[in-house]
Amino acid sequence: TPISCHGGHIALLHPHAYGLAQACISEGVIVDYRHPNLIRMSAHPLYISDKDFIMALNIIIKLLKNSCYLQSYNSMEVS
């Protein structure tokens, strides 16, 4: 399909996607978890600004660096 027909989502594959998604939500970043290891977020300009998107990415980077999602949500992993 042509690039102009693609949706407005960014997808992130991660082995602990559920925990990372829950940590994102607790930080105010709205994401969509898809079993088994996918997190999606919208980058559509009708919904969020560039500033909002960069702020969300910085929060995700912070979460990935400190790995707090492993302790907080590890036991809640969905199978």
Image (cartoon, rainbow, N blue to C red):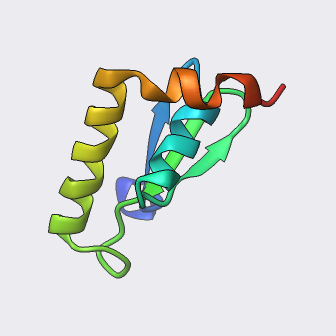
Where's residue 69, x and y in %?
Answer: 50, 29
Q: Is residue 62 left or right of residue 77?
A: left
- Residue at x-position 35% and y-position 33%: 63
Q: Is residue 46 visible?
A: yes
Give 40 or 79, whichever is nearer the viewer.
79
- The residue most toward the right is 79
- Residue at x-position 31% and y-position 74%: 48
In this picture, is 58 found above or below 3? Answer: above
In this picture, is 4 found above or below 12? Answer: below
Number of residue marks: 0
Give 57 or 1, whichever is nearer the viewer.
57
Q: Is residue 77 visible?
A: no
Quarter where residue 33 is shown = top right
In this picture, is 20 found above or below 14? Answer: below
- Residue at x-position 75% and y-position 31%: 76
- Residue at x-position 52% and y-position 48%: 40
Q: Quadrant of the C terminus?
A: top right
- The residue most toward the bottom is 46
Quarter where residue 60 is shown = top left
Give 24 or 46, whichever is nearer the viewer.
24
Where's residue 5, x and y in %?
Answer: 45, 63
Give 1 or 65, whichever is nearer the viewer.
65
- The residue most toward the top is 15
Where's residue 39, x and y in %?
Answer: 54, 41
Where's residue 51, x and y in %?
Answer: 15, 66
